[in-house]
Amino acid sequence: MIDNSVICALATSQVASAISLIRISGEDSFKVVNKIIKFKNKDKKFNKIDGFTIHRADIYDNKILIDDALISVFKKPYSYTGENMIEISCHGSTYIQQKFLELLTKNGARLANAGEFTLRAFINGKIDLSQAEAIADLISSTNTASHDIAINHLRGGFKNELSVLREKLLNLASLIELELDFSEEDVEFADRKNLLQIINELITKVSYLKNSFELGNAIKNGILITIAGNTNVGKSTLLNAILNEEKAIVSNIHGTTRDVIEDIIVYNGINFRFADTAGIRASKDKIEKIGISRSLAQIKRAKVILLMVDTLTPQKQIEKIYKSVFSKLTSSQSIILLLNKSDLCKLNEKISLENFCKKLIKPTDSFITISAKKKINIGIILKEIYKKVVKTHILSDNVIITNTRHFEALSKAEETLNQIKIGMKNNIQSDLLVQDLKEALYYIGNITGEITNNEILNNIFKNFCIGK
């Protein structure tokens, strides 16, 4: 996957700026850079200076001075890539940036491929593959939660969880293989009840990690919140109140919203994607019917449905709407039933409706009385959404996965472990049991890169930034 060549790249944006950073890595990095620089202190030599030090130097193209720069020196194996490495901090002229790269390539380096610095760090054992992917996630993080998850993975949180799983699986496989070596003597080194208990523990752990993907993926891409309900109950007014801008057209004409209108807000460091949908009702209008179909699709995809009714809606109709939406949801989804236009309702009528709604909703759902027009209790809606889908997970130290590749590998590992469990209950032969254990090890190892192939590596690193 890598050669011994010296690579170089611009690590900062290719635009005019105060400062630019150029990275160089490879066994002969110091030789290449030495051809174009002169240290301010003429007695300094790369073979005599320490790593993790910064030195001032002039950059030359033959005898022509190009820039006055700072040279950061990192010596193997204590660098990001595990190789000899240099970072040049120079003035941010686009001419200087290109001139530096030209000089480096002219004197023995080549331009780095996307993600090649991190690939070398992986190949040289500085990080595992899950940590390499965490670097890409950290660079692309757009909110506090996605940043925190990426940092946790980069610091080895996920790696440590997987290391424990691998160690237990290796121990199990070793014990069973040892039994095979003494098969003629009918010796049992591993108590089957204890093995089954360990397998159950592994299934529980793998299942938790796999299931965390739903939340992790939502945090990474924005958690979808769908505003649904009949026409003219205030859905568009609510979206505008949440976004604090006139995003959706508001009208007292039924069926005004005919398509999904979506926007993002950041609340407590989390991206929430709020979608205003067409009112759900029987309609003969072809365009409105398409909008209603899209509304139903949004409900299926949403983590939370803000189901809106208003104080003018009869109780039987509220019950019908709620049960209809609830019947379409999975166990991971929930409803916040919103009783809108509370400012237009008499106190005794409002209390009666509130009591009815509280009795109607399931224990997993919530109910809030609001006025979207007057922005009453909008903050309570946001707090309730956050509590439902994020708080209990983010405030814990549990690992949350956000990567589809990890999810697929964990799903296959879980499936294999369940096969092992069934096999053990049916007294499967030890040699077949070992093969299943090795298969589970393969899937776990695929995540960390202990078992991988060039196709997987190419697919991962092609999406990295140049210079990282």
Image (cartoon, rainbow, N blue to C red):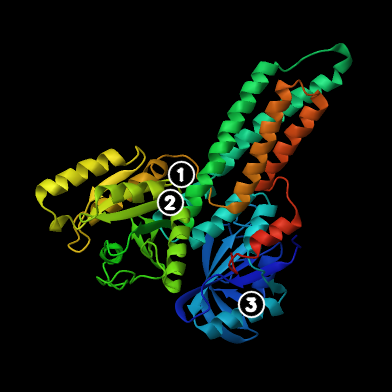
Q: Residue at x 73, y 50 (%)?
A: 452
Depth order, front residue of 388/141: 388
| Three-letter code, disc 1 | Ser
Question: In the image, which disc is placed on residue 303?
Answer: 2
Select label 1 or label 3 by which is in front.
Answer: 1
Q: Can residue 163 be seen in this view?
A: yes
| Residue bearing the label numbered 1 | 332
Q: Residue at x 58, y 28 (%)?
A: 201
Disc 2 to disc 1: CB gap under 8 Å: yes
What whole-number distance in Å separates the C-alpha atoms at marks 2 and 1? 7 Å
| Three-letter code, disc 3 | Ile
Depth order, front residue of 121/248: 248
What whole-number distance in Å separates the C-alpha atoms at marks 1 and 3? 60 Å
Q: Which residue is drawn at 20% across and 64% down?
A: 373
Which residue of the protein is positioned furthest toward the front in this rendering?
Answer: 284
Which badge, 3 or 2, is on the more N-terminal residue?
Answer: 3
Residue 142 in percent (x, y) is at 43, 61
| Three-letter code, disc 2 | Lys
| Horizontal arrangement in the rendering, residue 158 relative to residue 279 (left or right) | right
Which badge, 1 or 3, is on the more N-terminal residue?
Answer: 3
| Residue bearing the label numbered 3 | 36
Element at label 1? loop
Q: Tell me the quadrant of the picture where the N terminus can be found.
A: bottom right
What whole-number distance in Å separates the C-alpha atoms at marks 3 and 2? 57 Å
Q: Tell me the quadrant of the picture where the C terminus can be found.
A: bottom right
Depth order, front residue of 245/5: 245
Disc 1 to disc 3: CB gap under 8 Å: no
| Horizontal arrangement in the rendering, residue 389 relative to residue 162 (left or right) | left
Q: Which residue is drawn at 85% across and 17% down?
A: 182
Element at label 3? loop
